[in-house]
């Protein structure tokens, strides 16, 4: 029998409803929530044929293991992630926030990046297939659940994907400790993709050239750069702060 997993929050469960509805055995929802987002979610879940179980906030928190469930918790089986960029971005409400990792091969770093992406509410993490680590057990453990909640897209051609993001009016911002402009001088409230590079070399040249803009995180001490997951945290949380979600 396949292992049971818990998914929670509108985004994670909606993505799973779209990509693998058959993997969801039941969705527990907070009956007291009757707002438009919940009504739309329940309509979508019914359309997908999901079994719905009415519940309350306390029981949902026990099921999810925390209180950040937004009134929606799904019991499901694990599936291999098969998201497409279109699947993920079409379901986004508001301005997309995407993390792109060019050449992160250390599973601990990928796990930590997924974890911080989840924390900051990023809609997806994108990486090149031939230049990255996959979602292995170490990644999943370090990610602390975020490997299930954040869509991880491994793409064949990263530069092409960055151009597709631009076609969707997503501003592609590369990061490098050599860049002149500071991340704190950017307006990150609109649709953005933040591109980070590999542990040793940083972003590949073509990746950097494809970005709309390059920015640095100010460094005050003797070291030149931050660990990639720390840099991802700084950038994503600056976007979150600017979007006014920092006090939640
Ligand atoms: C360990 S750093 C690699 C440093 C490498 N020397 C370079 O040229 O980018 C890994 C990644 O974290 C991000 N990063 C780390 N420190 C940064 C900083 N101070 N400013 C901007 N990005 C930074 C960049 O995306 C970088 O490619």
Image: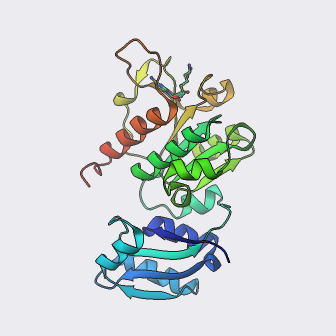
Residue drawn at (39%, 81%) of the image: 29
**Horizontal relation, residue 23 to residue 189: left or right:** right
Question: Which residue is rendered at x = 49% and y = 75% of the image?
Answer: 74
Q: Which part of the image, by quadrant, shows the C terminus?
A: bottom left
- Can you tell which quarter of the image residue 184 is in? top left
Q: Nearer the viewer, residue 27 or 236?
A: 27
Q: Residue at x 66, y 58 (%)?
A: 84
- Counting every numbered tag in the picture gives 0
Q: Is 177 above or below relative to 40?
A: above
Left or right: residue 115 compared with residue 139:
left
* Residue 219 in the image, given as x and y percentages of width and height: 38, 19
**Residue 167: in sight, yes or no?**
no
168 relative to 217 in the view: left or right: right
In this rendering, is residue 62 above or below 225? below
Q: Position of residue 162 (x, y in %)?
A: 62, 41
**Where does the image place residue 2, in percent across and percent down from the top left?**
66, 74
Q: Is residue 106 above or below residue 97?
A: above
**Hey, which residue is sitting farthest left in the picture?**
247
């Amino acid at each position: 029998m396949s292992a049971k997993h818990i998914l929670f929050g509108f985004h994670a469960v909606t993505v799973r409803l779209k990509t693998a509805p058959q993997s969801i055995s039941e969705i527990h929802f907070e009956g007291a929530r009757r707002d438009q987002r919940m009504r739309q979610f329940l309509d979508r879940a019914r359309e997908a044929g999901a079994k719905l179980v009415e519940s309350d906030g306390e029981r949902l928190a026990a099921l999810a293991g925390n209180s950040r469930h937004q009134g929606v918790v799904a019991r499901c089986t694990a599936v291999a992630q098969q998201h497409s960029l279109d699947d993920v971005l079409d379901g986004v409400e508001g301005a997309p926030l995407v993390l792109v990792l060019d050449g992160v091969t250390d599973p601990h770093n990928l796990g930590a990046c997924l974890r911080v992406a989840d924390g900051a509410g990023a809609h997806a993490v994108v990486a090149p297939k031939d230049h990255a680590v996959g979602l292995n057990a170490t990644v999943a453990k370090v990610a602390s659940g975020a490997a299930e909640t954040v869509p991880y897209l491994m793409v064949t051609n990263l530069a092409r994907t960055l151009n597709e993001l631009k076609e969707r009016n997503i501003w592609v911002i590369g990061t490098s400790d050599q860049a002149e402009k500071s991340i704190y001088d950017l307006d990150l409230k609109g649709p953005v993709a933040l591109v980070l590079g590999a542990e040793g070399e940083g972003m590949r040249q073509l990746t950097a050239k494809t970005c709309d803009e390059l920015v640095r995180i100010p460094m005050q001490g003797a070291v030149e750069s931050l660990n990639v997951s720390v840099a991802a945290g700084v950038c994503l949380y600056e976007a979150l702060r600017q979007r006014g979600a920092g006090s939640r």
